[in-house]
Amino acid sequence: MKNNSKIQLGNDGPMVSRLGLGCMRMSSIWGGPTPNEQESIATIHEALYMGINFLNTGDFYGAGHNEMLIGKAIKGRRDEAFISVKFGAIFHNGQWLGMDLRPIAIKNFINYSLTRLGVETIDLYQPSRMDGSVPVEDIIGTVADLIQEGKVRHIGVSEITADQLRKANEIYPISALEIGYSLADRQIELELLPTAKELGVGIVAFANTAEGLLTGEMKTPLPENDYRNHFSRFEGENLINNLSKVEILKQLASNKGCTPTQVAIAWVKEQGDHIMPLVSMSRRSRLPENINAMDIKFSPEEMNTLNTTFAIGAIHGGTYLNR
Ligand SMILES: NC(=O)c1ccc[n+]([C@@H]2O[C@H](COP(=O)([O-])OP(=O)(O)OC[C@H]3O[C@@H](n4cnc5c(N)ncnc54)[C@H](OP(=O)(O)O)[C@@H]3O)[C@@H](O)[C@H]2O)c1
C-alpha cells in the first residue's frame, strides 16, 4: 500500500492499516471444511509483512478455531497486529441460534477470547449484532468496564441501525462500525453512513465482493452444494440480472487493466477516508492483488458508470445481510 496506508478508526481512535484482513474464511463456516491452516497462518504473516495489521475475527468463527489460529500466527509478534473481535453470536452445529449479550455472558466471553488468542488485551471488541432483550446501555457499558479492567482497548459495533449507533455512542465513544458494504449493497448510504460520519465513527466495510458476485468469477447455475444457493441474490432470474451488471464491472476493470475484485475494493475505499475495506483472504496469492487495489483511482466517468450500474436496487435479491 503505497498511498494512504493508515486509517484512523473514529475521531480519537487508533491508527490501523488502510486495508483490513478478514480471517473468517480461514475457519469452517456454514459447515464447510476447514481451509489449510498452514496457508492461513502464512497469509497472516505475509499480510503483517506487507503492512496489513488489522486482523478481524469473531469468537464464534469456527467455534473458537479462528481465534486460536490468529493466536498461533501472532505468537511472539503481538505488537505487529491490531486484533478486532466480535462476540455474542450463539451457534450450535453450525446453525445460528441467536445472540447472548447479557453482561454476565460478555464477561465470560472475553476471558475465553483472550486465552484462545494468547493476548492480554483485545484492541477492538464488539457485539456482532444487537440483542433486543438487553439494553444497549448494558452491552456497551459492560465493554466499557472491560476497558477499565485493561482487557479491551476500543469499542466497536457491527450491523446495527443508525438509532442504535447514536445510543451506543452516547454511552461510550464508538471507534468503528463493522458493516456490509459494496457496489451490490449500498442501502447504508441512506442513513447509517451519514450518521456514522456525523458521530465520527470509523467504518470497517466487509463483504466488498458481495459473496463473490463482484469478483467476476461466478457462473450460473452455482454448484448444488454451494452455500450461496440459500441466498435469493443467487437464484434463477435474480442471478441472471445480477451477472449482467457484473459484465459492465468486468469491462470497466479490463479497460483499466485491473480485476473486477480490485475495482470492487477500490470503490469501497473511495467512498471516504474513514472507510476501511475489510477483505477475506485465506491464501497468500490474494494479497498483492488486493493491496494494489488500494492505489486505484477512478475518473468521474468511471465512478458514474459504477454508481449508476450499481444504483440502490439494481442488484436483485439479498444475502444473509437482508437489508
Ligand atoms: N460483522 C459481520 O457481520 C461480518 C459478516 C461477515 C464477514 N465479516 C468479516 O468481514 C470479512 C470479509 O467478509 P466476507 O468474507 O464476507 O467478504 P469478502 O471479503 O468479499 O470475501 C468473499 C470471498 O472473496 C474472495 N476473494 C478475496 N480476494 C479475492 C480476489 N482478489 N479474487 C477473487 N476472490 C477473492 C475470498 O476468498 P478466499 O477466502 O478464498 O481468499 C472470499 O471467499 C470476513 O473475513 C469477516 O472477518 C463480518
Image (cartoon, rainbow, N blue to C red):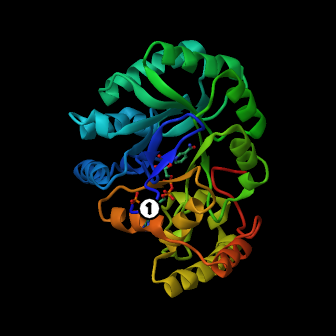
- The residue drawn where x is 63% and y is 50% is 320
State the residue in front, 240 or 213. Answer: 213
| Pointer 1 residue Cβ closer than 8 Å to ligand 1 | no
x and y, in percent, of residue 42 in the image: 24, 52
- The residue drawn where x is 63% and y is 39% is 201
Q: Which of the 4 image quarters holds residue 46?
A: bottom left
x and y, in percent, of residue 5 in the image: 43, 55
- Residue 220's place in the image compared with 139, above or below, is below
> What residue is disc 1 on?
3
- Residue 176's place in the image compared with 101, above or below, is below
Residue type at numbered disc 1:
Asn
Residue 134 visible from this viewpoint: no
State the residue in front, 195 or 112. Answer: 195
Residue 287 visible from this viewpoint: yes
x and y, in percent, of residue 76 in the image: 20, 33
Horizontal side of residue 58 vs 88, given as left or right: left
- The residue drawn where x is 59% and y is 49% is 274
Count of numbered marks: 1
State the residue in front, 272 or 220. Answer: 272
Q: Which of the 4 image quarters holds residue 150?
A: top left
Give the position of the N terminus as an image quadrant.
Answer: bottom left
Q: Secondary structure at mark 1?
A: loop
- Residue 174's place in the image compared with 222, above or below, is above
State the residue in front, 64 or 177. Answer: 177
- The residue drawn where x is 39% and y is 22% is 112
How crowded pointer 1 is (Cα within 10 Å; few <14, some 14-19, many 20+) is rated as few
Q: Which of the 4 image quarters holds residue 66?
A: top left
